[in-house]
Image (cartoon, rainbow, N blue to C red):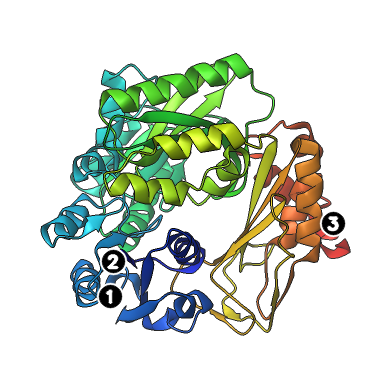
Amino acid sequence: MFKVAICNRGAAAARLVRTIREMGCKSIVLCSEADQDLPYVKKADEFAVIGPPPPKDSYLNQEAVIQAALAAKAEALHPGWGFLAENAAFARKAADNHLIFIGPSPKFLEIMGHKVSARDEMVKLGLPVAPSTGELSGTISEMAETAAQIGFPLLIKPAGGGGGIGMTPAESREKLEKALETAQNLAQRSFGSASLYAERLLTNPRHVEFQIVADRLGTCVHLGERDCSVQRRRQKILEEAGAPNLAPAEVAAMAAKAAEVMARIGYDSLGTVETLYSPETGFSFLEVNPRLQVEHGVTEEIAGLDLVEAQLTAARGESVGDLLKRAQANAPGGHALEARIYAEDSLRFFPSPGRLSVFRPPKAQKGRVRVETGYAEGSTVTPFYDPMMAQVIVHGQDRQEAIALMEEALAAFEIAGVKSNVSFLRLMLRSPKYLEGAVNVSLAEELVKSPEYKADLEAL
Protein backbone atom coordinates (compact mmCIF):
# COMPACT_ATOMS: atom_id res chain seq x y z
CA MET A 1 0.00 0.00 0.00
CA PHE A 2 1.30 3.48 -0.93
CA LYS A 3 2.77 5.06 2.22
CA VAL A 4 3.22 8.81 2.74
CA ALA A 5 5.50 10.32 5.37
CA ILE A 6 4.16 13.63 6.70
CA CYS A 7 6.70 16.19 7.86
CA ASN A 8 4.52 18.86 9.38
CA ARG A 9 2.38 19.39 12.43
CA GLY A 10 -0.93 20.58 13.84
CA ALA A 11 -3.92 21.10 11.59
CA ALA A 12 -1.82 20.58 8.46
CA ALA A 13 -0.72 17.10 9.53
CA ALA A 14 -4.21 16.18 10.72
CA ARG A 15 -5.66 17.31 7.38
CA LEU A 16 -3.14 15.22 5.44
CA VAL A 17 -3.73 12.10 7.54
CA ARG A 18 -7.45 12.28 6.75
CA THR A 19 -7.15 12.57 2.96
CA ILE A 20 -4.33 10.01 2.74
CA ARG A 21 -6.59 7.50 4.51
CA GLU A 22 -9.57 8.38 2.28
CA MET A 23 -7.37 7.68 -0.76
CA GLY A 24 -6.67 4.19 0.54
CA CYS A 25 -3.04 4.98 1.39
CA LYS A 26 -1.06 4.74 4.63
CA SER A 27 0.43 7.64 6.58
CA ILE A 28 3.33 8.04 8.97
CA VAL A 29 3.59 11.29 10.89
CA LEU A 30 7.12 12.54 11.55
CA CYS A 31 6.87 14.70 14.65
CA SER A 32 8.96 16.45 17.27
CA GLU A 33 9.15 15.37 20.89
CA ALA A 34 6.77 18.21 21.78
CA ASP A 35 4.07 16.99 19.40
CA GLN A 36 4.11 13.22 19.87
CA ASP A 37 1.03 13.20 22.11
CA LEU A 38 -1.19 15.32 19.85
CA PRO A 39 -4.30 13.45 18.62
CA TYR A 40 -3.52 13.31 14.90
CA VAL A 41 -0.25 11.48 15.64
CA LYS A 42 -2.24 8.54 17.00
CA LYS A 43 -4.73 8.69 14.10
CA ALA A 44 -1.96 8.11 11.56
CA ASP A 45 -1.03 4.55 10.71
CA GLU A 46 2.42 5.13 12.21
CA PHE A 47 4.50 7.89 13.74
CA ALA A 48 8.17 8.55 14.37
CA VAL A 49 9.82 11.17 16.60
CA ILE A 50 12.48 13.01 14.61
CA GLY A 51 13.98 15.36 17.18
CA PRO A 52 13.64 17.91 20.01
CA PRO A 53 11.00 20.67 19.90
CA PRO A 54 12.96 23.50 18.19
CA PRO A 55 12.10 23.39 14.44
CA LYS A 56 15.77 23.42 13.42
CA ASP A 57 16.23 20.16 15.34
CA SER A 58 13.11 18.45 14.02
CA TYR A 59 10.84 19.77 11.26
CA LEU A 60 13.69 21.64 9.55
CA ASN A 61 16.25 18.88 10.06
CA GLN A 62 16.39 17.51 6.52
CA GLU A 63 18.60 14.52 7.28
CA ALA A 64 16.43 13.42 10.21
CA VAL A 65 13.28 13.71 8.10
CA ILE A 66 14.71 11.74 5.17
CA GLN A 67 16.14 8.99 7.37
CA ALA A 68 12.86 8.61 9.29
CA ALA A 69 10.89 8.35 6.04
CA LEU A 70 13.29 5.73 4.69
CA ALA A 71 13.25 3.75 7.95
CA ALA A 72 9.45 3.62 7.74
CA LYS A 73 9.68 2.40 4.13
CA ALA A 74 7.62 5.37 2.94
CA GLU A 75 7.29 5.90 -0.80
CA ALA A 76 6.46 9.61 -0.64
CA LEU A 77 7.07 12.59 1.60
CA HIS A 78 4.58 15.41 2.16
CA PRO A 79 6.03 18.60 3.71
CA GLY A 80 2.60 20.15 4.36
CA TRP A 81 2.33 23.92 4.00
CA GLY A 82 5.30 25.37 5.83
CA PHE A 83 8.71 24.32 7.17
CA LEU A 84 10.40 22.50 4.23
CA ALA A 85 7.52 22.81 1.74
CA GLU A 86 9.36 25.35 -0.45
CA ASN A 87 12.90 24.05 0.00
CA ALA A 88 14.33 22.91 -3.35
CA ALA A 89 17.38 21.25 -1.79
CA PHE A 90 15.10 19.15 0.40
CA ALA A 91 12.95 18.14 -2.58
CA ARG A 92 16.07 17.06 -4.47
CA LYS A 93 17.34 15.16 -1.44
CA ALA A 94 14.01 13.33 -1.24
CA ALA A 95 14.24 12.39 -4.92
CA ASP A 96 17.86 11.28 -4.52
CA ASN A 97 16.62 8.89 -1.85
CA HIS A 98 13.84 7.57 -4.12
CA LEU A 99 11.09 9.36 -2.21
CA ILE A 100 8.31 11.13 -4.12
CA PHE A 101 8.23 14.75 -2.99
CA ILE A 102 4.58 15.81 -2.85
CA GLY A 103 4.83 19.23 -4.39
CA PRO A 104 6.22 20.76 -7.56
CA SER A 105 9.43 19.66 -9.25
CA PRO A 106 12.53 21.11 -7.55
CA LYS A 107 13.20 23.50 -10.43
CA PHE A 108 9.95 25.32 -9.64
CA LEU A 109 10.80 25.44 -5.95
CA GLU A 110 14.09 27.06 -6.93
CA ILE A 111 12.30 29.71 -8.96
CA MET A 112 9.13 30.22 -6.92
CA GLY A 113 10.37 29.33 -3.46
CA HIS A 114 12.82 32.20 -3.77
CA LYS A 115 10.61 35.28 -3.94
CA VAL A 116 13.07 37.46 -5.87
CA SER A 117 13.56 34.81 -8.57
CA ALA A 118 9.80 34.39 -8.83
CA ARG A 119 9.23 38.11 -9.29
CA ASP A 120 11.90 38.28 -11.98
CA GLU A 121 10.32 35.36 -13.80
CA MET A 122 6.81 36.82 -13.59
CA VAL A 123 7.98 40.18 -14.91
CA LYS A 124 9.46 38.43 -17.94
CA LEU A 125 6.12 36.71 -18.52
CA GLY A 126 4.11 39.92 -18.36
CA LEU A 127 2.60 40.04 -14.89
CA PRO A 128 2.50 43.50 -13.24
CA VAL A 129 4.59 43.94 -10.09
CA ALA A 130 5.09 46.60 -7.44
CA PRO A 131 8.51 48.36 -7.20
CA SER A 132 11.04 46.15 -5.40
CA THR A 133 14.73 45.35 -4.95
CA GLY A 134 16.53 42.20 -5.90
CA GLU A 135 17.94 40.04 -3.13
CA LEU A 136 19.69 42.32 -0.64
CA SER A 137 23.36 41.70 0.15
CA GLY A 138 26.18 43.10 2.25
CA THR A 139 26.03 44.56 5.73
CA ILE A 140 22.80 45.79 7.30
CA SER A 141 23.84 49.34 6.44
CA GLU A 142 24.56 48.42 2.80
CA MET A 143 21.25 46.59 2.49
CA ALA A 144 19.47 49.62 3.90
CA GLU A 145 21.07 51.90 1.32
CA THR A 146 19.90 49.63 -1.50
CA ALA A 147 16.38 49.23 -0.14
CA ALA A 148 15.93 52.97 0.45
CA GLN A 149 16.39 53.68 -3.24
CA ILE A 150 12.88 52.45 -4.12
CA GLY A 151 11.24 54.83 -1.64
CA PHE A 152 9.17 54.57 1.53
CA PRO A 153 7.19 53.00 3.06
CA LEU A 154 8.89 49.63 2.55
CA LEU A 155 8.12 46.05 3.45
CA ILE A 156 11.15 43.86 4.18
CA LYS A 157 10.47 40.23 3.26
CA PRO A 158 12.27 36.88 3.45
CA ALA A 159 13.37 35.76 -0.01
CA GLY A 160 12.47 32.21 0.98
CA GLY A 161 9.49 30.96 2.97
CA GLY A 162 6.04 32.46 3.23
CA GLY A 163 2.96 32.69 5.43
CA GLY A 164 3.64 36.31 6.35
CA ILE A 165 6.46 35.21 8.67
CA GLY A 166 9.32 37.68 8.85
CA MET A 167 7.63 40.47 6.91
CA THR A 168 8.64 43.72 8.58
CA PRO A 169 7.52 47.24 7.60
CA ALA A 170 9.83 50.26 7.57
CA GLU A 171 8.15 53.65 7.27
CA SER A 172 11.37 55.67 7.13
CA ARG A 173 15.15 55.45 6.72
CA GLU A 174 15.55 55.75 10.49
CA LYS A 175 13.58 52.54 11.05
CA LEU A 176 15.01 50.59 8.13
CA GLU A 177 18.11 48.99 9.68
CA LYS A 178 16.14 47.72 12.68
CA ALA A 179 13.50 46.29 10.32
CA LEU A 180 16.19 44.51 8.32
CA GLU A 181 17.72 42.98 11.46
CA THR A 182 14.31 41.80 12.67
CA ALA A 183 13.34 40.29 9.33
CA GLN A 184 16.73 38.61 8.94
CA ASN A 185 16.53 36.95 12.35
CA LEU A 186 12.97 35.72 11.75
CA ALA A 187 13.83 34.43 8.27
CA GLN A 188 16.84 32.49 9.53
CA ARG A 189 14.93 30.98 12.42
CA SER A 190 11.82 30.07 10.41
CA PHE A 191 13.19 29.05 7.01
CA GLY A 192 16.88 28.37 7.51
CA SER A 193 17.81 31.26 5.22
CA ALA A 194 18.42 34.91 6.14
CA SER A 195 18.12 36.29 2.59
CA LEU A 196 15.81 39.29 2.20
CA TYR A 197 14.37 41.67 -0.35
CA ALA A 198 12.36 44.88 -0.09
CA GLU A 199 9.25 46.04 -1.89
CA ARG A 200 7.22 49.23 -1.84
CA LEU A 201 4.50 48.97 0.76
CA LEU A 202 1.20 49.88 -0.88
CA THR A 203 -1.29 51.83 1.23
CA ASN A 204 -4.28 49.71 2.27
CA PRO A 205 -4.36 47.31 -0.69
CA ARG A 206 -6.36 44.10 -0.84
CA HIS A 207 -4.64 40.73 -0.80
CA VAL A 208 -6.16 38.52 -3.49
CA GLU A 209 -4.76 35.13 -4.50
CA PHE A 210 -5.51 32.58 -7.22
CA GLN A 211 -5.50 28.81 -6.73
CA ILE A 212 -3.63 26.90 -9.44
CA VAL A 213 -4.05 23.15 -10.06
CA ALA A 214 -1.57 21.50 -12.42
CA ASP A 215 -0.06 18.09 -13.08
CA ARG A 216 2.94 16.64 -14.92
CA LEU A 217 0.87 15.77 -17.99
CA GLY A 218 0.14 19.33 -19.11
CA THR A 219 -2.98 20.30 -17.16
CA CYS A 220 -2.84 23.77 -15.61
CA VAL A 221 -6.02 25.58 -14.55
CA HIS A 222 -7.19 28.00 -11.89
CA LEU A 223 -9.99 27.48 -9.38
CA GLY A 224 -10.79 31.13 -8.87
CA GLU A 225 -9.74 33.62 -6.25
CA ARG A 226 -9.54 34.02 -2.49
CA ASP A 227 -9.52 37.29 -0.60
CA CYS A 228 -7.04 37.21 2.30
CA SER A 229 -7.04 40.91 3.14
CA VAL A 230 -8.00 40.65 6.81
CA GLN A 231 -4.59 40.35 8.45
CA ARG A 232 -2.85 41.03 11.75
CA ARG A 233 0.87 41.85 11.52
CA ARG A 234 1.00 40.55 7.93
CA GLN A 235 -0.57 37.26 9.01
CA LYS A 236 -3.83 36.20 7.38
CA ILE A 237 -6.60 35.57 9.89
CA LEU A 238 -9.91 35.67 7.99
CA GLU A 239 -10.12 34.54 4.35
CA GLU A 240 -12.91 34.03 1.86
CA ALA A 241 -13.74 32.73 -1.58
CA GLY A 242 -14.59 34.59 -3.69
CA ALA A 243 -13.42 38.14 -3.24
CA PRO A 244 -16.23 40.59 -2.41
CA ASN A 245 -16.87 43.82 -4.30
CA LEU A 246 -14.45 43.28 -7.16
CA ALA A 247 -15.50 43.45 -10.80
CA PRO A 248 -15.99 39.81 -11.91
CA ALA A 249 -14.50 40.49 -15.33
CA GLU A 250 -11.35 42.02 -13.82
CA VAL A 251 -10.91 39.10 -11.43
CA ALA A 252 -11.53 36.55 -14.18
CA ALA A 253 -8.96 38.20 -16.43
CA MET A 254 -6.29 38.11 -13.72
CA ALA A 255 -7.12 34.50 -12.83
CA ALA A 256 -6.81 33.48 -16.48
CA LYS A 257 -3.52 35.35 -16.81
CA ALA A 258 -2.14 33.65 -13.68
CA ALA A 259 -3.05 30.19 -15.01
CA GLU A 260 -1.64 31.04 -18.45
CA VAL A 261 1.70 32.14 -17.00
CA MET A 262 1.98 29.05 -14.80
CA ALA A 263 1.15 26.85 -17.78
CA ARG A 264 3.80 28.57 -19.91
CA ILE A 265 6.53 27.72 -17.42
CA GLY A 266 5.27 24.11 -17.24
CA TYR A 267 4.25 24.21 -13.59
CA ASP A 268 3.34 20.70 -12.43
CA SER A 269 1.61 20.78 -9.03
CA LEU A 270 -0.70 22.88 -6.88
CA GLY A 271 0.25 26.45 -6.04
CA THR A 272 -1.05 29.93 -5.38
CA VAL A 273 -0.40 33.13 -7.31
CA GLU A 274 -0.69 35.95 -4.78
CA THR A 275 -1.40 39.56 -5.72
CA LEU A 276 -2.11 42.91 -4.14
CA TYR A 277 -5.02 44.89 -5.50
CA SER A 278 -5.89 48.57 -5.31
CA PRO A 279 -8.39 50.48 -7.44
CA GLU A 280 -5.59 52.80 -8.59
CA THR A 281 -3.08 50.15 -9.70
CA GLY A 282 -5.25 47.08 -10.27
CA PHE A 283 -3.53 43.75 -9.59
CA SER A 284 0.20 43.61 -8.77
CA PHE A 285 1.97 40.26 -8.58
CA LEU A 286 3.25 39.53 -5.08
CA GLU A 287 4.62 35.98 -5.04
CA VAL A 288 3.94 32.37 -5.94
CA ASN A 289 3.56 29.90 -3.12
CA PRO A 290 4.48 26.53 -4.70
CA ARG A 291 2.47 24.55 -2.17
CA LEU A 292 -0.97 24.46 -0.63
CA GLN A 293 -1.97 27.37 1.58
CA VAL A 294 -3.59 27.19 5.00
CA GLU A 295 -6.66 28.81 3.44
CA HIS A 296 -7.07 26.24 0.65
CA GLY A 297 -10.18 24.94 2.43
CA VAL A 298 -12.37 27.83 1.30
CA THR A 299 -11.62 26.99 -2.33
CA GLU A 300 -12.41 23.33 -1.67
CA GLU A 301 -15.80 24.27 -0.25
CA ILE A 302 -16.96 26.16 -3.33
CA ALA A 303 -15.14 24.08 -5.96
CA GLY A 304 -16.04 20.64 -4.62
CA LEU A 305 -12.47 19.36 -4.97
CA ASP A 306 -10.14 17.86 -2.35
CA LEU A 307 -6.96 19.78 -3.12
CA VAL A 308 -4.77 17.43 -1.10
CA GLU A 309 -6.04 14.54 -3.22
CA ALA A 310 -5.24 16.54 -6.35
CA GLN A 311 -1.78 17.31 -4.99
CA LEU A 312 -1.00 13.65 -4.28
CA THR A 313 -2.39 12.62 -7.67
CA ALA A 314 -0.17 15.10 -9.51
CA ALA A 315 2.91 14.10 -7.50
CA ARG A 316 2.45 10.46 -8.52
CA GLY A 317 2.56 11.50 -12.16
CA GLU A 318 -1.13 10.93 -12.73
CA SER A 319 -3.68 13.20 -14.40
CA VAL A 320 -5.86 15.48 -12.29
CA GLY A 321 -8.28 15.73 -15.20
CA ASP A 322 -10.88 13.32 -13.84
CA LEU A 323 -10.85 15.04 -10.45
CA LEU A 324 -11.39 18.41 -12.12
CA LYS A 325 -14.23 17.10 -14.30
CA ARG A 326 -15.98 15.57 -11.31
CA ALA A 327 -15.57 18.79 -9.33
CA GLN A 328 -16.84 20.91 -12.20
CA ALA A 329 -19.95 18.76 -12.46
CA ASN A 330 -20.65 18.92 -8.72
CA ALA A 331 -19.22 22.30 -7.70
CA PRO A 332 -21.48 23.74 -4.98
CA GLY A 333 -20.52 27.37 -5.64
CA GLY A 334 -21.70 29.84 -3.04
CA HIS A 335 -19.35 31.58 -0.62
CA ALA A 336 -16.87 30.25 1.96
CA LEU A 337 -15.02 31.81 4.90
CA GLU A 338 -12.13 30.62 7.04
CA ALA A 339 -11.21 31.95 10.48
CA ARG A 340 -7.84 31.10 12.01
CA ILE A 341 -8.05 30.37 15.73
CA TYR A 342 -4.90 31.36 17.61
CA ALA A 343 -3.75 30.86 21.18
CA GLU A 344 -3.24 34.56 21.82
CA ASP A 345 -4.96 37.33 23.68
CA SER A 346 -7.23 39.67 21.75
CA LEU A 347 -5.71 42.90 23.12
CA ARG A 348 -1.95 42.68 22.65
CA PHE A 349 -2.01 39.57 20.44
CA PHE A 350 0.84 37.88 22.27
CA PRO A 351 1.02 34.06 22.12
CA SER A 352 -0.69 32.27 24.99
CA PRO A 353 0.80 28.77 25.28
CA GLY A 354 -0.59 26.33 27.80
CA ARG A 355 -2.73 23.26 28.37
CA LEU A 356 -6.16 23.21 26.76
CA SER A 357 -8.33 22.43 29.76
CA VAL A 358 -11.35 23.02 27.51
CA PHE A 359 -11.24 22.71 23.73
CA ARG A 360 -14.63 22.15 22.13
CA PRO A 361 -14.87 23.27 18.51
CA PRO A 362 -18.23 23.88 16.88
CA LYS A 363 -20.00 20.78 15.61
CA ALA A 364 -19.14 19.93 12.02
CA GLN A 365 -21.98 20.14 9.50
CA LYS A 366 -21.24 18.59 6.11
CA GLY A 367 -21.11 21.27 3.44
CA ARG A 368 -21.66 24.03 6.00
CA VAL A 369 -19.22 23.96 8.95
CA ARG A 370 -15.80 22.30 9.01
CA VAL A 371 -13.00 22.44 11.57
CA GLU A 372 -9.34 21.65 10.90
CA THR A 373 -7.26 21.19 14.04
CA GLY A 374 -4.34 19.25 15.42
CA TYR A 375 -5.43 19.68 19.04
CA ALA A 376 -7.96 18.20 21.43
CA GLU A 377 -9.04 18.86 24.99
CA GLY A 378 -6.05 18.16 27.23
CA SER A 379 -3.47 18.95 24.54
CA THR A 380 -0.74 21.50 25.17
CA VAL A 381 -0.05 24.46 22.92
CA THR A 382 3.73 24.79 23.22
CA PRO A 383 5.78 27.98 22.73
CA PHE A 384 7.94 26.36 20.04
CA TYR A 385 5.63 26.86 17.05
CA ASP A 386 3.05 29.14 15.49
CA PRO A 387 0.17 29.37 18.03
CA MET A 388 -2.60 28.57 15.52
CA MET A 389 -4.90 25.97 17.07
CA ALA A 390 -7.54 25.50 14.40
CA GLN A 391 -9.25 26.77 11.30
CA VAL A 392 -13.02 27.09 11.18
CA ILE A 393 -14.38 26.93 7.62
CA VAL A 394 -17.97 27.65 6.69
CA HIS A 395 -19.88 27.49 3.41
CA GLY A 396 -23.07 29.35 2.60
CA GLN A 397 -25.19 30.06 -0.44
CA ASP A 398 -23.92 33.64 -0.37
CA ARG A 399 -21.59 35.84 1.68
CA GLN A 400 -24.28 36.96 4.06
CA GLU A 401 -25.19 33.38 4.97
CA ALA A 402 -21.52 32.43 5.33
CA ILE A 403 -20.90 35.30 7.76
CA ALA A 404 -23.92 34.26 9.83
CA LEU A 405 -22.69 30.66 9.91
CA MET A 406 -19.22 31.77 10.99
CA GLU A 407 -20.59 33.97 13.75
CA GLU A 408 -22.66 31.04 15.03
CA ALA A 409 -19.70 28.65 14.83
CA LEU A 410 -17.30 30.97 16.65
CA ALA A 411 -19.86 31.68 19.36
CA ALA A 412 -20.05 27.92 19.99
CA PHE A 413 -16.26 27.42 20.16
CA GLU A 414 -15.30 26.79 23.82
CA ILE A 415 -11.65 27.25 24.79
CA ALA A 416 -10.08 27.47 28.26
CA GLY A 417 -6.57 27.11 29.59
CA VAL A 418 -5.16 29.51 27.01
CA LYS A 419 -6.37 32.83 25.70
CA SER A 420 -7.76 32.90 22.16
CA ASN A 421 -8.58 35.38 19.40
CA VAL A 422 -12.15 34.15 19.01
CA SER A 423 -13.68 37.34 20.42
CA PHE A 424 -11.54 39.44 18.09
CA LEU A 425 -12.74 37.40 15.10
CA ARG A 426 -16.37 37.79 16.13
CA LEU A 427 -15.96 41.57 16.34
CA MET A 428 -14.26 41.54 12.95
CA LEU A 429 -17.26 39.74 11.45
CA ARG A 430 -19.54 42.47 12.85
CA SER A 431 -17.42 45.36 11.57
CA PRO A 432 -19.52 47.53 9.21
CA LYS A 433 -16.72 47.64 6.64
CA TYR A 434 -16.31 43.88 6.73
CA LEU A 435 -20.03 43.33 6.38
CA GLU A 436 -20.00 45.64 3.35
CA GLY A 437 -17.09 43.72 1.82
CA ALA A 438 -14.89 46.85 2.01
CA VAL A 439 -11.87 44.81 3.08
CA ASN A 440 -8.18 45.75 2.97
CA VAL A 441 -4.99 44.81 4.81
CA SER A 442 -5.48 47.57 7.41
CA LEU A 443 -9.03 46.68 8.38
CA ALA A 444 -8.06 44.55 11.39
CA GLU A 445 -5.70 47.22 12.70
CA GLU A 446 -8.47 49.81 12.41
CA LEU A 447 -10.76 47.62 14.49
CA VAL A 448 -8.18 47.06 17.23
CA LYS A 449 -7.35 50.76 17.44
CA SER A 450 -10.98 51.88 17.64
CA PRO A 451 -11.95 53.54 20.97
CA GLU A 452 -14.69 51.02 21.68
CA TYR A 453 -12.69 47.87 20.92
CA LYS A 454 -11.74 46.91 24.48
CA ALA A 455 -15.27 47.46 25.79
CA ASP A 456 -16.73 45.47 22.90
CA LEU A 457 -14.38 42.57 23.70
CA GLU A 458 -15.44 42.56 27.32
CA ALA A 459 -19.11 42.57 26.30
CA LEU A 460 -18.81 39.29 24.34
Residue at x 56% of width, y 16% of height: 250
Q: Please state which amino acid type lies under the numbered disc 2.
A: Leu
Residue at x 47% of width, y 35% of height: 324
Foreground disc of the pair 3, 1? 1
The answer to whether the residues at label 1 and label 2 have Cβ atoms under 8 Å apart is yes
| x and y, in percent, of residue 299 in the image | 56, 41
Residue 210 in sight from this viewpoint: no
Task: Name the residue beneath numbered marker 3.
Answer: 456
Q: Please state which amino acid type lies under the numbered disc 1.
A: Asp
Task: Name the residue beneath numbered marker 1.
Answer: 57
Name the quadrant containing residue 69. bottom left
Horizontal side of 279 relative to 429 (left or right) equals left
Q: Please state which amino acid type lies under the numbered disc 3.
A: Asp
| x and y, in percent, of residue 419 in the image | 67, 72
The numbered mark at residue 185 is none
Horizontal side of 171 relative to 6 (left or right) equals right
Name the quadrant containing residue 329. top right
Task: Name the residue beneath numbered marker 2.
Answer: 60
Q: Which callout, 3 or 1, points at the residue further toward the start of the chain?
A: 1
